[in-house]
Image: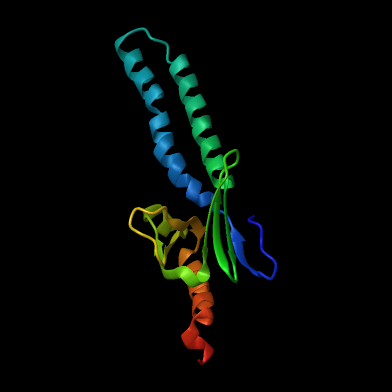
Amino acid sequence: MADILDGEKLIWAGRPTWKWSLTFILKWGILALIPLIAGVVLSQVSSVAVTWFFAATVILVAIVIVLAWVRRLDTHYTVTDRRLIVRHGILNRNERSASLERIQNVNTGQGLLGRLLNFGDVEFDTAGSEVGDAELALRGVNDPHQVRDDLDRILIGRSPSSSGV
């Protein structure tokens, strides 16, 4: 979790859901099956043993699962009453933050698997950001529409027009 400044109140903290890792595992896991498929095909046309191809596939699938797990654990999101913070990395730390006052739009996105399992992305457009700037987003969160709605309530509560001025 990111460091919270004095006077800040934690609103929400989390990391991508395990369901988000399924997308990575499915995509790269299918590619990891290539050695096994090649071994089976080669064993049909020659006397090549499938054992080594099977072992290579098991190792590649294990690597894919470990990478998906690390990718999930090295990402952490924090929302306070003042800032939005996205932190990535275990050995090399990368942290992006923005004041809630700079957030102009909150968008959600879900792929097919995300719609089926109810996870997705919440993306933020900030004042002064250009196209091509590094993005600020909560990737792979459970119920992205609820997260967006909760953040919208916070943002609306902070807007000058809602303060009665």
The residue at the far left in this view is: 45
Measuring 46% from the left and 15% from the top, which residue is drawn there?
52
Give x and y (percent) for residue 141.
Answer: 51, 58
Give x and y (percent) for residue 89.
Answer: 56, 43
What's the coloring here? rainbow
- Left or right of 18, for residue 123: left
The residue at the far bottom in this view is: 164
Measuring 49% from the left and 31% from the top, which residue is drawn there?
61
Give x and y (percent) for residue 124.
Answer: 43, 63
Measuring 66% from the left and 70% from the top, which residue is drawn there?
9
Question: Residue 40 or 80: which is nearer the viewer?
Answer: 80
Q: Is residue 21 above or below residue 148?
A: above
The residue at the far front in this view is: 128
Give x and y (percent) for residue 7.
Answer: 69, 71
Question: Residue 84 or 7: which is nearer the viewer?
Answer: 7
The residue at the far top in this view is: 47
- Left or right of 119, for residue 38: left
**Figure quadrant of the N terminus:** bottom right
Question: Residue 131 or 28: which is nearer the viewer?
Answer: 131
Measuring 61% from the left and 61% from the top, which residue is drawn there?
13
Question: Residue 138 or 40: which is nearer the viewer?
Answer: 138
Question: Residue 135, located in which quarter of the rendered image?
Answer: bottom left
Question: Residue 83, located in which quarter of the rendered image?
Answer: bottom right
- Left or right of 165, for residue 6: right
